[in-house]
Image (cartoon, rainbow, N blue to C red):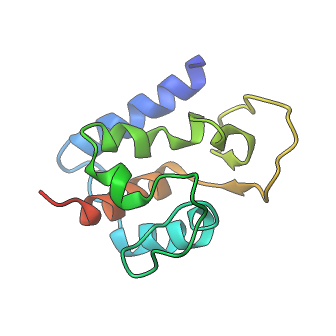
Amino acid sequence: MCIAVRGIVALVAVAWLVPGSALAEGDAANGETLAKTHCQRCHVVSPENRYAGIESTPSFMMLSSRDDWSERYSTFFDRPPHPVFARVPGVPRRTNIPSHVAEFEVTLEEIDDLLAYARTLRKE
């Protein structure tokens, strides 16, 4: 993982874990909207629509049930195939491979919103 990405991942992880941090809570409703806008083209993102997405990708419910769920959501933009089309401001392009789908930008705050939404999908 490049230094810039590691720095952003560390920032997100620290902000998410530190009480009172600006990113600590996230907005689950906005996270759901983001997931339905950008992620649903490949993933099933909610229990209400199990027929969205494509069969070869894990659902948000499955990803949220994993022990490492928060790390996966915090670093999704650096996990294949996401580096081709998911952009985080300030993080250099990892590849020059042309995107097979429309690119989108996601901020650190929006990543925290996705984490907050994923937290609502967990069965603890």
Residue at 35% over, 54% down = 62
Residue at 56% over, 73% down = 52
Residue at 38% over, 75% down = 29
> Quarter-wise, where is residue 30 in the image?
bottom left
> Observer-nearest residue: 55 or 21?
55
> Observer-nearest residue: 66 or 76?
66
The relative height of residue 24 versus residue 37 in the rendered view (above or below) is above
Q: Quadrant of the N terminus?
A: top right
**Is 20 placed left or right of 33 in the picture?**
left
Where does the image place residue 43, in percent across and percent down from the top left? 54, 61
Q: Quadrant of the C terminus?
A: bottom left
The relative height of residue 34 versus residue 73 in the rendered view (above or below) is below
Q: Residue furthest bottom?
A: 48
Q: Residue furthest front?
A: 55
Residue at 29% over, 45% down = 16
Q: Is residue 26 visible?
A: no
**Is 93 placed left or right of 65 in the picture?**
right
Where does the image place residue 15, in percent across and percent down from the top left? 32, 41
**Is 113 placed left or right of 35 in the picture?**
left
> Quarter-wise, where is residue 84 in the image?
top right
Number of numbered discs: 0
Q: Is residue 38 visible?
A: yes
Where does the image place residue 14, in percent across and percent down from the top left? 30, 35
Where does the image place residue 23, in percent across and percent down from the top left? 34, 52
The relative height of residue 5 versus residue 108 in the rendered view (above or below) is above
